[in-house]
Amino acid sequence: MMYISMKKFTVLLLLIFSLFGAFDVFAESSGTGFVSGNIWFSKESFEEGDKVKIYTFIFNPDSRELSGTVMFFDETVLLGKKDFIIPQRGAEDVSIDWTVTAGSHKIFGRIENARFFVSKGIYKEADLAEDETEKNSQTVSKKIIPETRATLENETENTSSTSILSIKDTILEKTPEFISKPMISITNSLEKVREGKRIVTDLKIEKVRNEIKVLEDNKAGSEESKTESPFLKPFKQIKLFLLSIFSIITGDRLIFYGILIVIIFSILRFIFNKILY
């Protein structure tokens, strides 16, 4: 990600300077405090409700230990604060957790109570060159939460159950007991099969979706993607489509029993035609 790479680049640059003994030269041209414009997030893109970390980076070129508090703001709203201690000629990142909210944001960090350690119990106020980061502007859209599958299924189940029970009562009233009992037993068995198939199908759908996501996440030109068949993703998408149709059929009683009746009727009709003709 762009933001994390910037952080790693800054740290690497400081380490290179220190290894070559040029840290003092760098310190003379850079003041204590934030690296200019330095604010980034643990995720490059996010949406409402996501939990992310807000980072900034503090540089201490002085020969004394630097301590203080970083206050993170969203314009005038305090998001959180974090105490820090930076050793002499050192640099460290400071972060807080943030639960993303919808709307426009201007996030920045500010150093307060900055001071240098002089000796035990004695501190000197630090004159910072950069005590506030640039404002990082973000606009987060309101997350639209669709009706859950469970809610839709409950509504469908309630409607279907009412219709099925009504038909079932009518059949039982007009059917002799020696016929109705086996019918009820068969119906109960079919219900168990239907529910079992629906659950298994939903699990398979989730598995195929994850497989497709893995294929999509593979970087173009990687060794792994070169060995994959170009037909693998289309095949899994077709499989997902067929599983989704089967899930709809097994998830709705009216559709399931309607199709079952049509199949049984077609089979009986075929047998009847073969016997008579």
Image: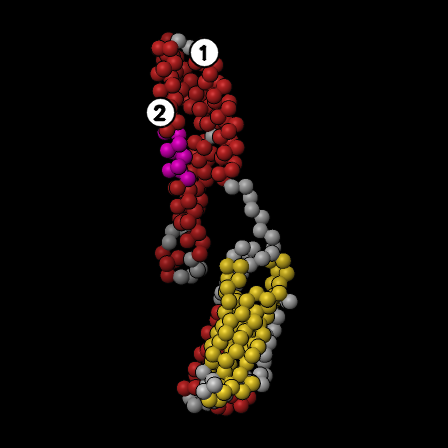
Q: Is residue 122 visible?
A: yes
19 over 82 or under it: above or below: below
24 over 241 or under it: above or below: below
Which of these two is toward me, 243 or 136? Answer: 136
Q: Which residue is mark 1?
A: 173
Amino acid type for the residue under numbered disc 1:
Glu
Amino acid type for the residue under numbered disc 2:
Ser
N-terminal of the two: label 2 or label 1? 1
Q: Which residue is mark 2?
A: 189
- In the rendered image, residue 252, in percent from the top left (x then y), is placed at 47, 30
The magenta segment: 193-202
Q: Secondary structure at mark 1?
A: helix
Furthest residue toward front: 121
Residue ID at (45%, 9%): 174
In the shown orientation, is residue 253 left or right of residue 71?
Answer: left
- In the rendered image, residue 184, in percent from the top left (x then y), is placed at 38, 19
Q: Residues within 10 Å of mark 1 (few under 14, many from 20)?
A: few
Please tell me whether the stretch drawn in magenta is mainly helix, strand or loop.
Answer: helix
- In the rendered image, residue 2, in percent from the top left (x then y), is placed at 51, 68
Residue ID at (46%, 27%): 253
Q: Which mark is residue 84?
A: none
